[in-house]
Each structure stands twice: as structure tokens, then as C-alpha cells.
Image (cartoon, grey):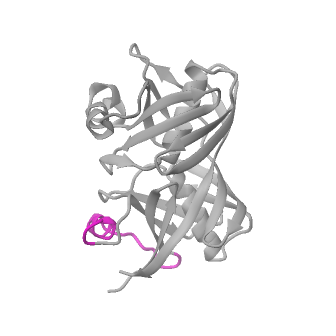
């Protein structure tokens, strides 16, 4: 059986997009692993199915490249909003439901295959700082944020140790973010992602978690951060009450259609 797909990327974080409207399409873990394989498939960090929603413009189902349906993906949320635009769904502002709740996405600009998309993320109700200074929080996916002096490091080795270590055990593992502070509101970031079990060129929920973590621990008066990921630039803005509650959280960055075909 042939399956039509679209390949998208957001700051180098890449995805296979599938149109599941009207089909009740639930891909198997084997199918996800096969289509995401970089050697024998399309190649991607993950896959998404755009499905019908009774109350909103669409529903987003996200799968990491290891197969199972996973937690929220911020770069994926921006890409699927741009994909919905290609399909003629919604206007400049789209609402969709994901595993972590309701999101809105605004198409800020269009330039051929590329768009700038502003995605509203879920509120963050608590931020935990442990004895080592590592910050743990959930921005739709669980994250650990560690400040480092040098990003020229073994992200995969150290990230895997932390992801499978006791700090992340309560959330069945977490994405691990290493951040270098470049200045006020300016950060550089590298991320190890669970479910992919490797470094990705960008992570949207990770960028969101990192910005909030730095506000919480080092720059409490800064509520807008520009982040340089390996694959491109992202920005995060939010409001906070100063007591560990963060609302009106928005992740902004590029989304690009790379190619489409049949698998």
C-alpha cells in the first residue's frame, strides 16, 4: 500500500507529516520506525498525523522515531500548523488539540515553502531545581536543563546518562538540554531527546523549558529569550508571577516544507 507523506523541518528538527482526516488512521509502531528510518525510509526525528477534531481546526498526533505515540513536540506543533495551512485548514490563527491539551498557532509570515509560526505552549505550574543546580520542568514533555560553560561536549553520552538516570526516573526519562548563557535573554542550546535517543538539531519544548529555567534561576526579569539551536534560531516569551508559575508561553520559529512523495 502506498502512503502519501510530506517532509517538514523546523530549525533542523525534521518530521514526516501524514494526512489522517476522515480515515481514522492509527499508524503502527513498526510503520513509524520504518518511515522515520534515515537509511531505509524517508528519514525523520518523528512523524505526525493530522486528524479530524470535533471542536478545533484539527488534532495532532506525534510519534517519536522509535514508534510509540509520544508527548508534545514544539517544533512539530509549528510544522503541523504550516502543514494544515497547505491543506487549507483554518486561517492565519489555527487551534488544535494535542496530547497535552489545546494549542493555538499563528502564521506570522509566508515565504514560499517556509513560514514563521508562533505557537502557544501549555502553562508551566512548577519548576524544580535540584542540589546540582539542574532544573526539571514539563513544557508538554519532561525536560532537564543544565547550564554549561562550553557546548563542545559529548551531548549524546552525557545526555543518555542523565535521561536514564535517577533524576529523570519519575517521568520515565526526560529530554536533556545543555545551555550556555550568552548574555541577557540570549542562549545557545543543544538537546538530547528521549524516544529518538540522540541529539536533535533543535527541540521546541526544550527551548521553551530552557528559557523558563534560565528566567527562574539566573535572569528573573527577562521574559523573552532568543535561543541558538544547532539547526536554527528560536524565540520564547512568557509571563510569570515570580513564584514558579509561567503562562502565556509562546514559541516562535521557522517551519519549512522540504518535499513530498509516496512511501
On the question of residue 54 being in view, the answer is: no
Residue 137: percent from left, percent from top: 49, 31
- The residue sitting at 28% across, 26% down in the picture is 166
In the image, farthest residue toward the bottom: 1
Among the 4 quarters of the image, the one containing residue 151: top left
Residue 32 falls within the magenta-colored stretch: yes
Residue 254: percent from left, percent from top: 60, 57
Can you say which quadrant of the picture contains the N terminus? Answer: bottom left
182 over 243 or under it: above or below: below
On the question of residue 205 being in view, the answer is: yes
Among the 4 quarters of the image, the one containing residue 236: top right
Residue 131: percent from left, percent from top: 40, 13
Residue 14: percent from left, percent from top: 44, 60
129 over 198 or under it: above or below: above
Residue 66 left/right relative to 181: left
Can you say which quadrant of the picture contains the C terminus? Answer: bottom left
140 over 63 or under it: above or below: above
- Magenta residues (range): 21-40
Report the front residue among 173 and 178.
178
Residue 225 left/right relative to 230: right
- The residue sitting at 49% across, 40% down in the picture is 206
What is the chief secondary structure element of the magenta stretch?
Answer: loop
- The residue sitting at 56% across, 19% down in the picture is 217
Amino acid at each position: 500500500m502506498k502512503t502519501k507523506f510530506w517532509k517538514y523541518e523546523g530549525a533542523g528538527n525534521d518530521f514526516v507529516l501524514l494526512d489522517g482526516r476522515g480515515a481514522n488512521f492509527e499508524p503502527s509502531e513498526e510503520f513509524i520506525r520504518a518511515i522515520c528510518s534515515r537509511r531505509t525510509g524517508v528519514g525523520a526525528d518523528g512523524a505526525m498525523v493530522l486528524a479530524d477534531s470535533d471542536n478545533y481546526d484539527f488534532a495532532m498526533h506525534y510519534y517519536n522515531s522509535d514508534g510509540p505515540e509520544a508527548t508534545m513536540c514544539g517544533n512539530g506543533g509549528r510544522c503541523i500548523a504550516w502543514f494544515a495551512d497547505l491543506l487549507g485548514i483554518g486561517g492565519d490563527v489555527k487551534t488544535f488539540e494535542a496530547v497535552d491539551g489545546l494549542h493555538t498557532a499563528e502564521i506570522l509570515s509566508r515565504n514560499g515553502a517556509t513560514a514563521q509560526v508562533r505557537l502557544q505552549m501549555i502553562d508551566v505550574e512548577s519548576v524544580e531545581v535540584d542540589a546540582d543546580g539542574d532544573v526539571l520542568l514539563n513544557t508538554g514533555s519532561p525536560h532537564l536543563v543544565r547550564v554549561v560553560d562550553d557546548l563542545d561536549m559529548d551531548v549524546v553520552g552525557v545526555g543518555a546518562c542523565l535521561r536514564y538516570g535517577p533524576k529523570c526516573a519519575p517521568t520515565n526519562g526526560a529530554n536533556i538540554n545543555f545551555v550556555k548563557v550568552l548574555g541577557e535573554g540570549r542562549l545557545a542550546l543543544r538537546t538530547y531527546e528521549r524516544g529518538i535517543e540522540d541529539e536533535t538539531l533543535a527541540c521546541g519544548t526544550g527551548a521553551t523549558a530552557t528559557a523558563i529555567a534560565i528566567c527562574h534561576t539566573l535572569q528573573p526579569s527577562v521574559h523573552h529569550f532568543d535561543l541558538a539551536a544547532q539547526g536554527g534560531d528560536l524565540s520564547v516569551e512568557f509571563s510569570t508571577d515570580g513564584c514558579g508559575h509561567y503562562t502565556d508561553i509562546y514559541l516562535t520559529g521557522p517551519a519549512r516544507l522540504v518535499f513530498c512523495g509516496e512511501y
